[in-house]
Image (cartoon, rainbow, N blue to C red):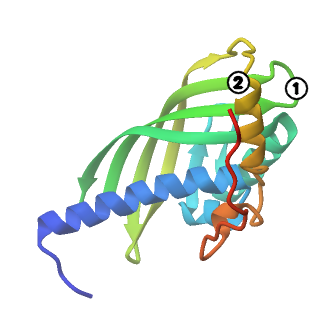
Amino acid sequence: MTAFPAELQQLIDRQQIYDCIVRYCSGVDRFDREMLRSAYHPDAVDDHGAFVGSRDEFIEWAISYHQKYQHHHKHYVLNHRCELEGMTAHTETYWLFSGKNKIGPPLSLCGGRYLDRFEKRDGKWAIAARKCIIEWTSEPPETVMPKENLEAAALTGVPLRNKDDPSYMRPLKVTRAKFVLPF
């Protein structure tokens, strides 16, 4: 294994930790159990408020929850702070959630923070403990989009919650013919 200067290794570690958080978001949004598992160590514990349990129990709970309550949903990460302490890191990551609901109001927005303890084991950073803090929820009023925006959105395709989603296409290819929506 190549030894890097300490400052460079810190940058590498921070990037790997951030990549893990983003991988978590993609995994939960795509219902990709394998990707989600890769964000956690096998003995990790997740406290999501309505759920506290192991990595695999959390994955099943989260996917079941989103399947039941949302047609589509997205997890976004915003500010991120990381304190490295050798093979342990403590992070605070602000998140934003949006969901197009099956039940209740048509759209939900929530915001909060992930408080994570990461550990580097066998060269891999992953979540060892997570506490999800939900700081606010909102049900925005229904808005009417202009017809052109609705048409443009429809042309982008349907987001899929599996490996048929275009985000898995390697290499990514644009298969649609040249097209411009008149406005």
Q: How many marks?
A: 2
Q: Quadrant of residue 43?
A: bottom right
Type of residue at label 1?
A: Ile
On screen, residue 84 versus residue 92, left or right, reads: left
Q: Quadrant of residue 174?
A: bottom right
- N-term mark: 2 or 1: 1
Residue 86 in the image: x percent, y percent?
24, 62
Residue name at image x 34 percent, y 60 percent: 15
Task: Give me the residue at 28% from left, 66% from top.
Answer: 12
Q: Where the N terminus falls, by quadrant?
A: bottom left
Q: Which mark, by number, is residue 103?
A: 1
Q: Nearer the viewer, residue 145 or 15?
A: 145
**Residue 24 image position (x, y, % from top left):** 57, 54
Mark 2–mark 1 distance (CA, rounded to whole Å) = 11 Å
Give the position of the C terminus as an image quadrant: top right
For label 1, count other residues whose C-alpha is less than 10 Å away and answer few (under 14), some (14-19) or many (20+). Answer: few
**Residue indicated by mark 2:** 108
Left or right for 12, reference 62 = left
Helix, strand or loop at label 1? It is loop
Q: Residue at x 71, y 49 (%)?
A: 156
Image quadrant assignment for residue 136: top right
> Can residue 87 be seen?
no
Could one spot residue 30 in this view of the protein?
Answer: yes
* Front in this rendered view, residue 66 or 143: 143
Q: What is the x, y in percent for residue 7?
A: 13, 63
The percent position of residue 72, horizontal first and vertical second, equals 76, 41
In the figure, 5 relative to 32: above or below?
A: below
Q: Relative to residue 46, is residue 9 depicted above or below?
A: below
The amino acid type, in three-letter code, at marker 2 is: Ser
Relative to residue 27, is residue 108 depicted above or below?
above
